[in-house]
Image (cartoon, rainbow, N blue to C red):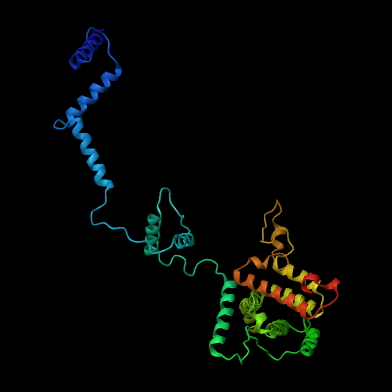
Amino acid sequence: MDFLKAEIERKKRQLQEKNIFPPNKKYFKRGDLMKKNQEDYHNRNNPTLDSSDDKEKCEEKVEVLNSEPENFKKEEIQLLRKDVIRRLRDRGEPVRLFGETDYESYQRLKRLETLEPDVNKGQGFQNDFKAALDKVDQEYLNELIKTTDGAVQSNDVSVKDDGTTLEDIEKMKKELGEIDRDRDQEIVLRFLKYILKLWGEELNSRPEEQKRTEKGKMSSATHTQTVVYLKPLFRKLKQRKVEEDILESMVDIVKNMMDRDYIKANDAYLEMAIGNAPWPIGVTMVGIHARTGREKISSRYVAHVLNDETQRKYIQALKRLMTQCQHFFSTAPSRSVNYESIK
């Protein structure tokens, strides 16, 4: 009890020393006590400055921080706003940060280009179809530069003739799939090149006015792109290094194309491209029985179009040649794919 009484007396003396009691009153407000404590704290830590001086000093500091040097001059924006937006989007950066002005956005782009100048070079997918269109336009431009009188007719696609004729195709049809895989690869190579040659000759036989139209340029660009896509496949066929499962499917496709049965050729193509399994990517653990799934990972069950980008491209180009083959060697509608659109 003595300790409690002593503590009460000490608190009373502190309140009397602070002089916070109003006149003729025995109570005080808590806000007055807190204000008095703040003043005491301020006097202990800054005995030479009063509150007004502190306020003025803080305001001066804020003005200095917010002001710019006298010799500072904003750099003029060298790019249009739409170009700044495009470059930022190419780098995967936000077009505008919160509270950011056009000038600050431009400065941020400059910093990014300085720190990471080659961030997008050689990366990502390229628009190869646009590159093919640009190549066609460039060939037209070069042709106009070389021939001012228009005497020489320009061919917008390159055509390579290995001497294969329709009679040779009829003979090779009997040998396909009957001798060995080296001979099969040779026949497939010659047949695909023959269809590619017919396609190029048809494009080059168009009138010059038709070649220069948008549709004509698109057709030429598609042919140019197909030639590029087929180069890896042709290289493998020449070297006799095509994978066994893919060669088996391609032999079925070419054989049906030679027989002008484009429905079966299309079925064989789909079987090679995406497979006929419910899990074409090669999922093996779809249930409690994993063995059955593993045994079905082969050419007939795996989607080859999903393997890599190069394979996807020449498989896509092969489909274009199938369409052109049906165009050149038409057959009954019951054996054709999309007969009305091809016709």
- Check the image and report above or below for 70 versus 262: above
- Image quarter (top left, top right, bottom left or bottom right) of the C terminus: bottom right
Residue found at x 25% / y 44%: 63
Q: Is residue 337 visible?
A: no
Of all residues shown, which one is farthest toward the front?
A: 149
**Of the pair 40 and 302, the residue shown nearer to us:** 40
Residue found at x 55% / y 67%: 125
- Check the image and report above or below for 106 versus 212: above
Residue 36 sits in quarter: top left
**Of the pair 57 and 235, the residue shown nearer to us:** 57
**Of the pair 240 and 19, the residue shown nearer to us:** 19
Left or right: where 9 falls relative to 86: left
The x and y percentages for residue 18 are 19, 17
- Check the image and report above or below for 16 versus 225: above
Left or right: where 178 falls relative to 75: right
Left or right: where 281 falls relative to 142: right
Counting labels gives 0
The x and y percentages for residue 92 are 48, 58
- Image quarter (top left, top right, bottom left or bottom right) of the N terminus: top left
The x and y percentages for residue 299 are 71, 68
Q: Is residue 134 visible?
A: yes
